[in-house]
Image (cartoon, helix red, strand yellow):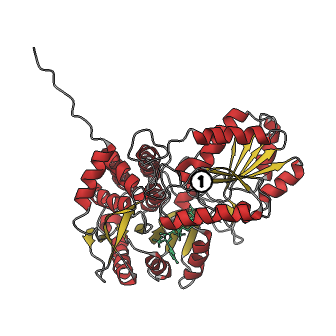
Amino acid sequence: MSSQPTAPIAETARQTADRLAAALAPAPRGLIIDGRAVPALSGKTFATENPATGLAICQVAEGGAADVDVAVAAARRALVNPAWAAMSAYDRGQLLYRLADLIEREADELAVLECIDNGKPASLTRWVEIEGSIKTFRYFAGWTTKFGGETLPVSPRSGARILNYTTREPVGVCGLIVPWNYPMSMAAWKVAPALAAGCTVILKPAEQTPLTALRLAELALEAGIPAGVFNVITGFGEAGAALVAHPGVDKVAFTGSTEVGKAIVRGATGNLKKVSLELGGKSPQIVLPDADLGAAAASIAAGIFFNQGQTCTAGSRLYAHAAIHDELLDRVAAEAAKLTIGNGLDAGVNFGPLVSQEQWDRVASYVEIGQAEGAEVMIGGGRPAAHGEGFFFEPTILRGAGRDMRVVREEIFGPVLSALSWSDADDLVAQANDSDFGLSAGIWTNDIRQGHRLAAAVKAGTVWVNCFNMVDNATPFGGFKQSGWGREHGRQAMELYSETKSVWVNLS
Ligand code: NDP
């Protein structure tokens, strides 16, 4: 019998996780400054843990203000270094394409790394974080050769013959501060347009999820991005605050809580650095009586339970018309029952733990607050019985919520849907807009006119009609009101990372 060549047997996610853990555990992960991994100047480290087990994965350097000084100096040198500053737009784009290729090469491993650091299932990290980041780097690589100025028809009073044109220049050194809920995606959303525009960056990942940010910077170096262009400072909020206050930083881009967003605005006043913010949300899901309830229920459940509700756009306020309210809630509950809760390394799991004990306590406290305010726990409300270890929290529906309740007004950032019933269409719009936030909204109706009217009436940066949580590099993403400043993705992201110069040339 001739022997057939056998294909190598792919590692399971658990095997990859064990291999990564064995490789990571022995030595602390360093900061990435000026192309090298270095310990924090203080020598301090902190543990990053696996939310599915509560156990430490490895130690990570705890960067502080002194490390931020060194990183900013490196980024300032890199900004004017001809190796970066004089690179053609085409070549800059090629480096970003190469980085995307390297992320693709490491996709399986990065998906598991994100899973063990954040808790979300590896199947989801692979799709959302890793494939999403590859697409983001390729999308912005394309912009390098397409983003420029224009010639403009100025009309000087003197009658002089003038050529007026605008150019785009990199805004400078950018401090990029990202949260733990979509660690690699949020990093990519900021790093990719910043580098495409020719800036240099210092990325500060969240203390809970530093590992993929460090790996991304290593891959950027392997891609050939010059040392000092892409630096990473791991650590706590103090490191982020030092970056925000630093006079050598020209721009800060932040995703996270509205509270910290406000602190960033205050902290950035010293040199009036440019600030863009993607902050919290309390997005309404509005369901009209003529909606396709099956499709709406499935999407409403995904809209709040995906990523365990730790999503800025989570559809956390449900406004169901009184005529279909009970049936819709039963259907959403049935969708929640289909979720497979567990360790995200196991096949078939699509609902993991919350990121930390702190976040678990916060979500649990909101369920208590909701009940004290008069809402009823229809499903969920606590730790699932089969998952003693880790920070697991059940998909939860709070029924009978009212417009003034805290669970309707505040961002819970967990798998908790606050459900309200409505019957007056004018009041519905007022209720949907009665929020400090304005990040996104969902509308469910088969009447196209109603869909468009509501899309126009709702105050939100993104409106989904008969769909939810669709995001694409080609279309702007960001919030009205206290959900943020500026828009990520698309041309608008390139604008965030560049300055416009108007040039007047007298041809008379
Ligand atoms: P934060 O907004 O505190 O953290 C986001 C990032 O900002 C992290 O990297 C954090 O560092 C950093 N940071 C913290 N304080 C400062 C500061 N003063 N100056 C500069 N950077 C700072 O979110 P949390 O992780 O604390 O989560 C708290 C709540 O925020 C959540 O429960 C949720 O409601 C909301 N949130 C909303 C997000 C969204 O996308 N809308 C994303 C994340 C959280 P570090 O964490 O390392 O200390």
Q: Can residue 252 be seen at all in this image of the molecule?
A: yes
Q: Quadrant of the N terminus?
A: top left
Question: Is residue 344 depicted above or below 184 in this figure?
Answer: above
The correct choice, above or below, for 246 with respect to 210 in the image is: below
Amino acid at dot 1 = Pro
Where is residue 258 drawn, in percent x and y? 62, 69
Extreme front residue here? 385
Residue 236, given in percent of the width and then of the height, sits at 43, 75
Query: Mark 1 highlights which residue?
Result: 415
Residue at position x 61%, y 75% in the image: 262
Q: Quadrant of the C terminus?
A: bottom right
Residue 504 lies, in percent from the top left, at: 57, 69
- Does residue 29 appear to the left or right of 175 in the view shown? left
- Callout 1 environment at 10 Å: few (<14), some (14 to 19), or many (20+)? many
Q: Secondary structure at mark 1?
A: loop
Q: In screen coordinates, is 445 left or right of 12?
A: right
Looking at mark 1, is its residue's CB closer than 8 Å to ligand 1? no
Q: Between residue 312 and residue 203, name the one nearer to us.
A: 312
Q: Nearer the viewer, residue 8 or 369?
A: 369
Horizontal and vertical percent for residue 186? 48, 58
Instruction: Kindly tell me whether residue 162 is visible in this rendering.
Output: no
Q: Is residue 394 above or below residue 39?
A: above
Name the residue rendered at 51%, 71% in the picture. Answer: 252
Query: In the depicted view, which residue is nearer to us: 90 or 421?
Result: 421
Residue at the farthest left position: 1
Q: How many numbered discs?
A: 1
> Compared with residue 224, is residue 108 higher up or lower down, i.e. above or below?
above
The residue located at (34%, 63%) in the rendering is 214
